[in-house]
Image: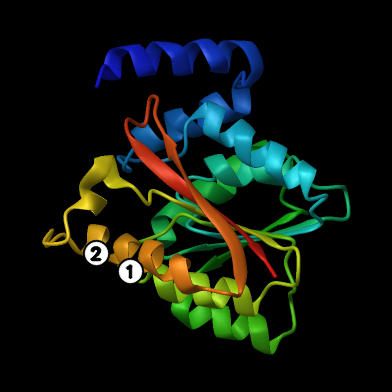
């Protein structure tokens, strides 16, 4: 595969239809300054998520995995003024960086960051009846991806769009013997879709600045 070509095309797309403003560029800078991993979605992927949020006319969004708030900002900008986005981040450090970026984007009234283990926080969200959500984006640690997906369905309604990122892992999902827990986690979720009657789903491959990966797109029945 020509990764250089994929990156050039991705940059071409971004310059045309997914231009990063100062706030989004600042998020990338904050990641570098805080010595955080550069694992946010790309600009074109962020615009894709925003487009999907608009297509679903989302008013309430749930995100698993905030990092520095890059995808959070793309998604929150698709919401109406009275919309709500709850995002869950395990790391207190990452959450603080994200909060600063979200305030710079003037989205602090829309975005609610919850800090801790997602598998602890998701039951709390259910107990407080904070759902159902119109769109749920899963981009967190990979080993419990199937459990996250199950929780997403619990917090959804018929028609909710669930998106799970990083489910191809540069094709490593093809190796049934791969010992990487991240690969095994997404394999479990991918394989479960073949018999999951709760959703209408597909998996798309993605290439670009984030190399070769993929996303699950699933509509709750």
* The quarter of the displayed image where residue 21 is located: top right
Residue in the foreground of this view, choosing between 189 and 135 = 189
Residue drawn at 41 percent across, 43 percent down: 214
Alpha carbon separation for disc pair 2 and 1:
6 Å
Residue 35's quadrant in the figure?
A: top left
Q: Position of residue 54 (x, y in %)?
A: 78, 42
The structure residue drawn at horizontal position 33% and vertical position 69%, both measured from the top left corner, is 188
Which quarter shows the C terminus? Answer: bottom right
Q: Is residue 116 visible?
A: no
Q: Which residue is mark 1?
A: 188
Choose top left, top right, bottom left or bottom right for residue 205. Answer: top left
Give the image location of residue 106, x and y in percent.
74, 40
Crowd class of label 1 (few under 14; some 14 to 19; many from 20; radius 10 Å): some
Residue at x 47% of width, y 57% of height = 65
Task: Check whether the beta carbons of the residues at disc 2 and disc 1 lie within 8 A of each other.
Answer: yes
Q: Tell me the element at label 1.
A: helix
Q: Residues within 10 Å of mark 2 (few under 14, many from 20)?
A: many
Residue at which label 2 appears: 184
Q: Is residue 92 at least partly visible in the picture?
A: yes
Of 115 and 126, the residue lying toward us: 126
Name the quarter where the N terminus is drawn: top left
Residue 141's place in the image compared with 97, above or below, is below
Q: Is residue 12 above or below residue 43?
A: above
Q: Position of residue 114 (x, y in %)?
A: 56, 67
Residue displayed at 44% across by 28% down: 29
Image coordinates of residue 182 in percent, x first then y, are 25, 59
Counting every numbered tag in the picture gives 2
Q: Which secondary structure lies at badge 2?
A: helix
**Horizontal side of residue 3 vs 82, given as left or right:** left
């Amino acid at each position: 595969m020509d990764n250089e070509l994929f990156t050039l095309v991705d940059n071409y797309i971004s310059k045309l239809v997914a231009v990063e403003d100062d706030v989004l560029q600042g998020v990338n800078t904050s990641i570098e300054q805080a010595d955080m991993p550069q694992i946010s979605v790309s600009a074109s992927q962020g615009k894709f998520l925003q487009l999907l949020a608009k297509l679903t006319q989302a008013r309430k969004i749930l995100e698993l995995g905030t990092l520095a708030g890059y995808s959070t900002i793309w998604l929150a900008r698709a919401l109406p003024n009275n919309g709500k986005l709850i995002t869950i981040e395990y790391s207190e450090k990452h959450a603080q960086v994200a909060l600063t970026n979200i305030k710079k984007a003037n989205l602090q009234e829309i975005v609610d960051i919850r800090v801790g283990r997602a598998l602890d926080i998701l039951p709390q969200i259910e107990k407080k009846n904070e759902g159902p959500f119109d769109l749920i984006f899963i981009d967190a640690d990979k080993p419990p991806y199937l459990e996250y997906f199950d929780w997403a369905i619990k917090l959804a309604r018929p028609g909710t769009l669930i998106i799970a990122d990083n489910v191809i892992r540069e094709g490593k999902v093809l190796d049934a013997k791969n010992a990487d827990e991240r690969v095994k986690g997404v394999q479990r979720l991918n394989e479960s879709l073949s018999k999951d009657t709760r959703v209408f789903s597909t998996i798309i491959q993605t290439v670009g600045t984030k190399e070769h990966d993929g996303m699950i797109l699933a509509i709750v029945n």
